[in-house]
Each structure stands twice: as structure tokens, then as C-alpha cells.
Amino acid sequence: TNMTEEKSVDVKQVLAAKFEPIHTTYTERDTILYALGVGEGYDPLDQQQLQFTYENHSNFSAIPTMGVLFPFPILLQVGTGQLPGLSFNPMMLLHGEQYLEIKNTIPTEGNLVTDARISGIFDKGKGALLQIDGHTKDASGKEICFNQISLFIRGIGGFGGDRGPAENPVSPPQRAPDCVHKDKTTTQQALLYRLSGDRNPLHSDPDMAAMGGFDRPILHGLCSLGFAGRAVLHHFCESDPTRIKAVRTRFSKHVFPGETIITEMWKVSPTRIVFQCKVAEREGIVLTNAYIDLHGASSKL
């Protein structure tokens, strides 16, 4: 019954939950696989794309949004629906928002450690908003990136908790975008992107997708974010990954593999690009509340 659902949130216990540090060891192959997974390399003669997809390129680099991968194993733990002070049906979990801040250039291979904790649980009435903070460092202790992941759990609101900080919506200016980038995803995009770590069957198994209410598997929201990140990287950063400081988005609607992602971008200040993503084939906005912050032009981290 609903009564027992409401009792399934113990805020103090949730906030005190401890996670083991996440160790990530990856190679150039993983860095290239991530880049291919978010659509890079579709023009194999483009030096700017080869920079992220060919290890012998003189400027071989990781695409900055690769930083979202490092805290991902935490989502597998949360996705079981069993946390200290919190139990829920895993099918009711939605990835709501993602914020990524790049502290130092993401290495093309390395050993990284991510410490994650639950930084907030908020009562949104229809559900609970779970906020997870992850700090990723290299073996020497240098901070590489910070992620904040917001997860929405439908159906377990009304436990009398804090509603959380006021929304701070990011809206595009009321004018035509400064730049529009169109990228057709491939029909196997989700099957490729999942090899970077998110093996949720919603993105690969037609039967599981049907249980989630979709007539076929959907693309990962973080894959769509990678497409948007590439658009900003190539159009506003001269393809220099060290220019990207932070990325934020809300996942508003799904994309089906094979659809065309349209990224509309507005330069609202010298260091902020506001963007939104649509698909050409259907109505609706896929990524909203979104921006990428840049370092000044001369900054090399």
C-alpha cells in the first residue's frame, strides 16, 4: 500500500550511506570506444575527429564528457532499489540531471579513484530526488573531475522531507540559436555506447524496453549528452578539450537509436554556451536546462 511506500525513506540513514571507493582502470581503447559511442569519427578524414578516435594522432585526447563514466558504478548500486534507509522499485528510477566539472584534463588512459556519497534526498511530492556527488582523482591525488547526479524515484514522495533547493532553470534566449548542429545517430548507437559501462538492458533488450513502456530500446541520456558536448567542442572550442570547464543538463525525453540529434547553441557570455537538443524525427526537447561553461581562450589546464 501507499502507506508502507511512504515509510520506506529514512533521510538520516540515506545521507549517512557509505560507498566503497570506485577504482577505474582504463586504456586508450576505452577512450576511443567512448568517443565512437557518442558519434565521433563519422568523418574519418577530419583531423579534429581523429584527435579523439586515433591513438597516434599528435593531439590524441579524451572527449571531456567521458568524465561522466567514472562514478557510474554507484548508479548500479542505487539501481538495485536497496540502499540504507531507502527501498523502491528500480523500474521507477529516472536519471534526472547531470552536472560534470572538469578539474584537470581527463587522461587518455589511467587509474582513477572516485569517492561518492549521497549529498541530498528531497521530497518532490510525486517522488524523491536523490543527489549523488562523485569526486574523481588520479593515483597521485590530483582531482580530475566532479560529478553531481540527480536521480528521480517516482512514487516514493510524501515522506515529509525537505523539498530541496529552488529550481534554477536555464532557458535559451528568445532568439535564433547562434549555431545548430545535426548528427544522425546510428541504429546500433546504444549497443555501442553501452560498452562504455552502462549495460542497463533498457538500452539493449527489446523485452526490457517494452516493460519500461517503449516499443524499442532507447538511447542512453548520457550518450545524447556526449553528442551535445561534441557539438559545443567543435563549434565553440576549436576542438580543444581543455577549453571545457563544466557541463550541465536535464534529461527530458528519450531518443531512439537511428534518430537525428539537433543541438541548438547560444553563446550567452564569453564563457557560457546554453544549449538544448531535439530530435528531427519527433516533437519535443530531449535535453533541457543545459549549458557548457568554458575556460577563457588562453587557458591550458
Image (spheres, rainbow, N blue to C red):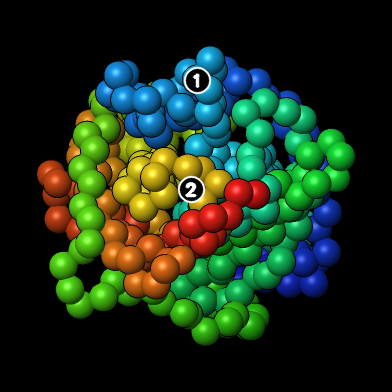
Residue nearest the observer in this picture, 208 or 266: 266
Residue at 33 percent of width and 61 percent of height: 275
Residue ID for mark 1: 57
Specify the quadrant of the image occupied by residue 109.
Answer: top right
Q: Position of residue 35 (x, y in %)?
A: 45, 29
SS category of the residue bearing label 2: helix
> Residue placed at 39% from the left, 45% from the top?
238
The quadrant where residue 256 appears: top left
Instruction: Judge left or right: residue 163 versus residue 14.
Output: left
What kind of element bears circle 1?
loop
Q: Are marks 1 and 2 in contact (CB under 8 Å)?
A: no
Q: Earlier in the sequence, mark 1 or mark 2?
A: 1
Q: Residues within 10 Å of mark 1 (few under 14, many from 20)?
A: some
Numbered tag placed on residue 91 in the rendering? 2
Whether residue 288 is visible to the viewer of this picture, yes or no, is no
Image spot of residue 132 (x, y percent): 66, 59
Observer-side mark, 1 or 2, equals 1
Q: Label 1 is placed on what type of residue?
A: His
Q: Compared with residue 271, is residue 253 higher up or lower down, i.e. above or below?
A: above
Furthest-front residue in view? 298
Q: Nearer the viewer, residue 297 or 27?
A: 297
Give the image location of residue 15, x and y in percent: 77, 66
The percent position of residue 140, horizontal first and vertical second, equals: 86, 39
